[in-house]
Structures are given as structure tokens and as C-alpha cells.
């Protein structure tokens, strides 16, 4: 009999009426676990617990919050190997990537352990004689965190840690496909002495419990990462309820390869950016915009490198690309592969592999034009459109011609081109001679346009979202 993993509400493991099985996408026989599938009543209980616990947590000495977050980071560090394996089994990224993500979660808690102590304000002379103006930051209250499946430990960590550091209480709703890592995070928070009700976990379907959280009158703010479609609905819910909202959504990230690029470096950056983590990254390089003089040589080298990638079980150390996360995601990817052919691209790769699990070969769509659907819509799989550009000017224009604006990149040996691109790119993050995916945790993360709304995540700037500014004027007489 497999043990059911419960929700975590008010410091207790709380049974839900229904459960969901979590299976390994590389091996459907492998049951990762059975997890609670909460309903509206569970969300209500979690929000009530958070509301009760928040005032004491928010007004406690910052040393207490800092200590809890440091202990969470320490315990996560101790469990990196275990968490990495769990993550690889439930999401399908390679063990190396999964270990890296688990380590990142620990680092994030350590970073925000420090931020809990900082909480900077400002004191300024008022414009009126004898008056002082003081600007401080206060917690928001109860915040709802809604996370996707593709970074099942890093994203819960990069939302939970700053939210708690700022003195908020949290209700986390992880993706229904990947509850295990969030469950492990709840175990660690409990073991680290996080007071009951300060952190709550409600697992379940977004369609069933999402609205209960985003529409709850006692939730002050929602931080969401996921698809643009769901994000738009959440923005409307939050506007109706006058809640603060932060949305991190999709991307269609361009990588420009100019005639002055080191082609081997460009191929390595595009291979990583487009296909690693099975292309399931919001920052994936999904549009490769290549200047005409180097287009054919680049395509030849990238095709050779792509077809040599080792696809297989994420737990096998030799594997470079694991499975697609689910049957429905794979079906969507294969639809886009067909569409690329229908739209007139030459398609290389993009087949389902004849083995158990949801595996596909990575795909290149050659001869793509930027107005094709395969160049405009986020696919979220190991598929990249290759667009030929006449020159640097055209490449920059194509790169910026997208509704998204998360990450962008350029491979070039020219300082002038790199500087121009950094200045003119309309994305929130710009990479030079690096893949569009892969970021540091101590600097802001986020985009523009349909990719992001409502303030940056990560780094010190994340604290802006989780706090409310107060301006106080004092006349001492
Ligand atoms: P998704 O939008 O389907 O789900 C995200 C979360 O929202 C899940 O927890 C889901 O259960 C929940 N949800 C679903 N319907 C809801 C509703 N009506 N109300 C409230 N919550 C609801 O996204 P996904 O498939 O889990 O993740 C993939 C997407 O996430 C991609 O578009 C990817 O680009 C994006 N993403 C963005 C970033 C970023 O930082 N910009 C990072 C990772 C992933």
C-alpha cells in the first residue's frame, strides 16, 4: 500500500477528499507517489490558517524569519541528491539538471535569509519645516503562490523564500503534474521550525482550486508562474478582487546568430537553449535568427549536434535529454511539428520515440518565417524555428517582433553588435554569447509584454512585490 501524501495546512498534514497519482514520464510503471487533490474547503482552511498566523510572523524579529529561512536552506542542501532524483522522476529533466535545480532552491533560501534582515527604507527631510518623511516596507498579509511543473522546486522556492522573508504567510499551490518537490519543501519548512500556518501547501488541480485562491477575499496578493492563457484569467480575477498580482508567463525567445559569431560557440548556446530540459523552459531559445552568410554552415553544425543528443532515462548519467513531461504536452508538441510542415518548413527530427514513456526527438523547423504560428506561439517542447535574416538590422527587427519579451540572446564576436543588441532588445533579460536560458538567482528575473506583469522575481527586487510601501510624516512639535 502506497502512502498518501497530504496537504500541509496550519502546521499539520491534512487529508483531502481525493488523490492523484504522480507517475514518471520516462517510465509510466514508476509511481512517484500518490498526492492529495485538494478542493475549495482546503484552500479556505489554508487561507484561514495563514491569516491567523501572519501578524505574529510579520511582526516577529527579522532574526526569527532569517533563522527559519537559513535552516530551510541548510536542510534543502542536505537533501539535494534525494530532491534531484525525485525531480528527475516526476518532471523528466536529467539528473544533472535536477540536482542543479535542487541546489538552486537551497541557495534561494539562503539568499532570502539575508534579505529578511535588510528590509531597507528611506528617511528624508520633508518639504515642511520640522517634519520628517519616512518610507518603510510592510508585509502584504496572505499571499497565494501558484507554480508550474517545469521547475517544480526552484519556482516554489523563489516565490516562498522572499514572501516569507518579507513577513507574509503563504499558501502554495504547485502544479498538479509535479506535487512531490513542493511536498518535500513543506516537509523541510516544518522541520526547520516554520510556525504553523505561516506556510501552507494545497495540492490539486488549477481548474478546481485555482479560483478559490485567486478569488479569496483574505488573499492580498497572487504570484503566478505558468501559461499566458491561465495568467490572463488570474490577472482579471485579481483586478476584480483588487489584489496585487505578479505574472511570469511564456516566451518565444529569439537567439540571433550574426555573421561575426564564433559558430561553434553559437551552436553550443543554441543546442543548450533550445533543447536542454527538453525545451521545457520559459526562457528556451525557440527562434534561432541566423544571418544569411552563416545560415547554411550554422544549420549543418546544429543539425549534427542535435541529432547526436542522447535522449533517454533522466536517471541515466549519459542522458542529455529526458522525456516530455506528459502525454498531452507531447501531443501538443507533435501537433506543432505537423504544423511546421504545413506552414512550409523543412522539419528535421520531431518524432515520438518507439519506447515506453513520453519521448520525442528534438526538432528544427528550417526555412521558418517570423509570421508563421510556429514562430509566434510558445510550443514549450524541444522544437526551434530557424529564421534566416538578411543582416544584423533585420535580425534585430525579427527578434523584437513578438508578443512576448522574456529573454533574448545574441551570438557575435563584435562588441558593437553585442552592445547594440543589448540596448535595442525588447526582452527583460538579454544574453550575449550565452543560451537564452540559465540565470543567476541574485539578480532580477522577468520579462515584458505577454511574458510578465507586476514586478520582477529573484534578487533583491523580488522583495518589492512582497511588500507594501508606507510613507509616514512626523511633526515632533
Ligand atoms: P499552466 O498555466 O497550465 O499552470 C500553471 C499553474 O496554474 C499550475 O499550478 C496550474 O494548476 C495552475 N492553474 C491552472 N488553471 C488555473 C486557474 N484557472 N486558476 C488558478 N490557477 C490555475 O502552466 P504549466 O503548463 O504548468 O507551465 C508551463 C508554462 O509556464 C509555460 O507557458 C511556461 O512558459 C511558463 N513558465 C514561465 C516561467 C517564467 O518565469 N516566465 C517559468 C516557468 C514556466
Image (cartoon, grey):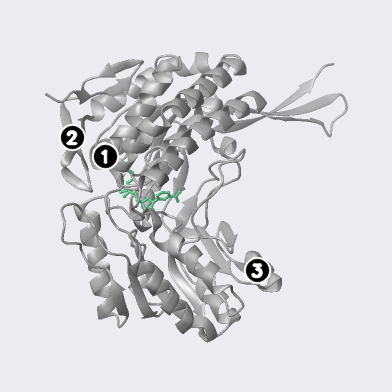
Q: CA distance from mark 2 to mark 1?
A: 8 Å
Against 250, residue 308 (above or below) is below
Label 2 crowd (10 A; few <14 / some 14-19 / many >=20): some
Label 1 crowd (10 A; few <14 / some 14-19 / many >=20): many
Against 239, residue 287 (above or below) is below
In the rendering, at what x and y percent does residue 301 appear?
44, 75
Label 3 crowd (10 A; few <14 / some 14-19 / many >=20): many
Which residue was labeled with disc 3?
418
Q: Are marks 3 and 1 in contact (CB under 8 Å)?
A: no
Q: CA distance from mark 2 to mark 3?
A: 48 Å
Cβ of disc 1 within 8 Å of ligand 1? yes
Instruction: Specify whether 287 is left or right of 177.
Output: right
In the rendering, at what x and y percent does residue 145 appear?
40, 35
Q: Are marks 2 and 3 in contact (CB under 8 Å)?
A: no
Q: Secondary structure at mark 1?
A: loop
Mark 2 or mark 3, which has the lower sequence index?
2
Q: Secondary structure at mark 2?
A: strand
Cβ of disc 3 within 8 Å of ligand 1? no
Give the mark toward the camera: 2 or 3.
3
Which residue was labeled with disc 2?
20
Amino acid at each position: 500500500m502506497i502512502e498518501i501524501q497530504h496537504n500541509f495546512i496550519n502546521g499539520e498534514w491534512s487529508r483531502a477528499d481525493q488523490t492523484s497519482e504522480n507517475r514518471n514520464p520516462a517510465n509510466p510503471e514508476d509511481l512517484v507517489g500518490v498526492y492529495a487533490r485538494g478542493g475549495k474547503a482546503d484552500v479556505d482552511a489554508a487561507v484561514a490558517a495563514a491569516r491567523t498566523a501572519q501578524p505574529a510572523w510579520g511582526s516577529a524579529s527579522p532574526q526569527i524569519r532569517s533563522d527559519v529561512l537559513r535552516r530551510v536552506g541548510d536542510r534543502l542542501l542536505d537533501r539535494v541528491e534525494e530532491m534531484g532524483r525525485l525531480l528527475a522522476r516526476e518532471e523528466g529533466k536529467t539528473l544533472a539538471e535536477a540536482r542543479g535545480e535542487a541546489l538552486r532552491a537551497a541557495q534561494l533560501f539562503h539568499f532570502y535569509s539575508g534579505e529578511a534582515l535588510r528590509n531597507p527604507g528611506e528617511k528624508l527631510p520633508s518639504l515642511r519645516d520640522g517634519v520628517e518623511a519616512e518610507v518603510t516596507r510592510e508585509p502584504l498579509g496572505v499571499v497565494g503562490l501558484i507554480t508550474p511543473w517545469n521547475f517544480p522546486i526552484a519556482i516554489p522556492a523563489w516565490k516562498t523564500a522572499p514572501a516569507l522573508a518579507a513577513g507574509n504567510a503563504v499558501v502554495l499551490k504547485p502544479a498538479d503534474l509535479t506535487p512531490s518537490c513542493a511536498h518535500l519543501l513543506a516537509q523541510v519548512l516544518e522541520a526547520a521550525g516554520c510556525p504553523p500556518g505561516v506556510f501552507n501547501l494545497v495540492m490539486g488541480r488549477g481548474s478546481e482550486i485555482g479560483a478559490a485562491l485567486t478569488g479569496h477575499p483574505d488573499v492580498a496578493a497572487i504570484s503566478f508562474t505558468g501559461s499566458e492563457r491561465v495568467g490572463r484569467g488570474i490577472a482579471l480575477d485579481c483586478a476584480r478582487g483588487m489584489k496585487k498580482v505578479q505574472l511570469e508567463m511564456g516566451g518565444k525567445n529569439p537567439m540571433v546568430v550574426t555573421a561575426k559569431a564564433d559558430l561553434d560557440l553559437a551552436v553550443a548556446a543554441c543546442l543548450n537553449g533550445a533543447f536542454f530540459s527538453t525545451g521545457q523552459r520559459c526562457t528556451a531559445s525557440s527562434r534561432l535568427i541566423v544571418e544569411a552568410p552563416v545560415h547554411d554552415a550554422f544549420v549543418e553544425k546544429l543539425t549534427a549536434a542535435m541529432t547526436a543528443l542522447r535522449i533517454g532515462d533522466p536517471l541515466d548519467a549519459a542522458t542529455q535529454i529526458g522525456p516530455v513531461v506528459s502525454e498531452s504536452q507531447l501531443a501538443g508538441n507533435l501537433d506543432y511539428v505537423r504544423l511546421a510542415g504545413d506552414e512550409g518548413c523543412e522539419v528535421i527530427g520531431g518524432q515520438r520515440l518507439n519506447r515506453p514513456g513520453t519521448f520525442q526527438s528534438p526538432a528544427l523547423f528550417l526555412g521558418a518565417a517570423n509570421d508563421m504560428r510556429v514562430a509566434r506561439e510558445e510550443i514549450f517542447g524541444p522544437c526551434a524555428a530557424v529564421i534566416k535574416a538578411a543582416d544584423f538590422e533585420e535580425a534585430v527587427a525579427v527578434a523584437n517582433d513578438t508578443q512576448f519579451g522574456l529573454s533574448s540572446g545574441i551570438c557575435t564576436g563584435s562588441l558593437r553588435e553585442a552592445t547594440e543588441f543589448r540596448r535595442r532588445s525588447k526582452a527583460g533579460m538579454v544574453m550575449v554569447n550565452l543560451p537564452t536560458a540559465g540565470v543567476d538567482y541574485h539578480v532580477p528575473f522577468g520579462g515584458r509584454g505577454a511574458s510578465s506583469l507586476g514586478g520582477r522575481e529573484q534578487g533583491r527586487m523580488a522583495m518589492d512585490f512582497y511588500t507594501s510601501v508606507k510613507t509616514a510624516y512626523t511633526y515632533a512639535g
